[in-house]
Image (tube, helix red, strand yellow):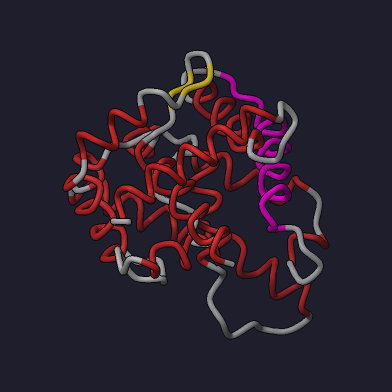
C-alpha cells in the first residue's frame, strides 16, 4: 500500500473511532481546538477556562505522565502560554493551510511561538527538578500544544514519528525542514487529502490540514506498535 493510501485510511479510522465514543480521549482535541477558535474572536477571553481545556487535552495525550514536570503543577502554569497564543500576531497560525504555512512570515511567527513556549516552561521544569536541566523542553509537549490550540503542526509524539518513518515522509524530529517536507507531501496529494478532509468535521468545526496528517500518521504508528 502506498503512503497516501494508508494515510487516508488511517486518518479515517482515527476519525471514525472518535465518532463511536462520544467521551473518548480523541474528543479532547476537538473540545480544545473549538474553544481556542471561539476565543480568538472574543474581546474578553476566559484564560482560566481555556487553560483548563488545554490541560485536560494534554493529559488525554500523555503530557501528565509520572515523569512529566507538568504533573507537579496545576493548570494555571499554562495561563501565560494561553495569553501568548491568543495574541493577534498568531491569528495567521490558526487552522493554517499548507500554502499559508509556507509563507516566511508565518514560519517566523511559528518559530517565535515555539521559542516562547520553551522559554516559559524551562524555569518551571528546572524548579520541579531542583536543578538546571540541560536538555531542551520537549518538542512533543510544544507541538501537542500547537496542535491543540492552533492546529498548525502535527504533534511529534512517538506514534506520529513511527508513522512518518514508515514511509520516510519526513524526519522523526520536529524542525522547520520536517514541517516543509510534510507540506510537500500534502500538496503532492492535495486533491485526495482534501476530499477526505471535507468529511472530517463536527458541526461547524472542520479539521485543519495538519490535523489530518497528525491523526493519520499517528494511527499508522499506533497500529504498527
Q: Whole-percent x and y of residue 97?
A: 28, 37
Q: State the residue at coordinates (74%, 67%).
A: 69
In-image side of 78 versus 162 (left or right): right
Give the position of the C terminus as an image quadrant. Answer: bottom right
Q: Is residue 162 above or below residue 33?
A: below
Q: State the residue at coordinates (78%, 80%).
A: 130
Q: State the residue at coordinates (73%, 42%).
A: 56
- Depth check, front residue: 22 or 125: 22
- Depth check, front residue: 16 or 108: 16
105 is within the stretch colored magenta: no
How many numbered dots are placed on residues in this image?
A: 0
In-image side of 47 versus 89 (left or right): right
Q: Which contiguous range is marked in magenta?
A: 44-63
Q: Residue furthest top?
A: 203
Q: Whole-percent x and y of residue 167?
A: 33, 66
Q: Is residue 181 above or below residue 60?
A: below
Q: State the residue at coordinates (20%, 48%).
A: 102
In-image side of 163 versus 38 (left or right): left
- Depth check, front residue: 92 or 172: 172
Q: Whole-percent x and y of residue 47?
A: 65, 32
Give the position of the N terminus as an image quadrant. Answer: bottom left
59 is within the stretch colored magenta: yes
Quarter of the rendering containing residue 189: top left
Instruction: Assign the magenta stretch its main secondary structure.
Output: helix
Q: Whole-percent x and y of residue 209?
A: 35, 38
Amino acid at each position: 500500500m502506498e503512503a497516501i493510501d494508508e494515510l487516508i485510511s488511517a486518518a479515517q479510522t482515527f476519525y471514525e473511532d472518535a465518532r463511536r465514543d462520544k467521551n473518548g480521549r480523541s474528543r479532547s482535541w476537538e473540545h480544545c481546538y473549538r474553544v481556542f477558535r471561539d476565543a480568538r474572536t472574543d474581546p474578553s477571553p476566559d484564560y482560566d477556562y481555556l487553560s483548563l481545556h488545554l490541560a485536560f487535552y494534554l493529559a488525554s495525550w500523555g503530557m501528565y505522565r509520572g515523569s512529566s514536570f507538568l504533573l507537579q503543577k496545576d493548570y494555571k502554569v499554562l495561563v501565560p502560554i494561553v495569553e501568548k497564543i491568543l495574541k493577534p500576531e498568531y491569528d495567521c497560525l490558526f487552522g493554517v493551510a499548507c500554502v499559508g504555512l509556507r509563507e516566511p512570515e508565518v514560519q517566523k511567527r511559528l518559530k517565535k511561538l515555539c521559542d516562547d513556549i520553551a522559554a516559559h516552561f524551562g524555569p518551571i521544569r528546572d524548579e520541579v527538578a531542583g536543578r538546571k536541566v540541560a536538555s531542551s523542553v520537549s518538542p512533543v509537549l510544544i507541538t501537542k500544544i500547537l496542535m491543540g490550540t492552533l492546529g498548525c503542526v502535527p504533534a511529534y509524539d512517538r506514534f506520529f514519528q513511527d508513522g512518518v518513518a514508515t514511509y520516510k515522509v519526513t524526519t522523526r524530529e520536529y524542525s522547520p525542514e520536517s514541517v516543509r517536507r510534510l507540506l510537500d507531501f500534502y500538496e503532492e496529494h492535495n486533491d485526495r487529502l482534501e476530499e477526505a478532509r471535507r468529511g472530517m468535521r463536527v458541526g461547524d468545526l472542520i479539521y485543519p490540514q495538519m490535523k489530518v496528517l497528525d491523526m493519520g500518521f499517528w494511527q499508522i504508528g499506533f497500529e504498527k506498535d
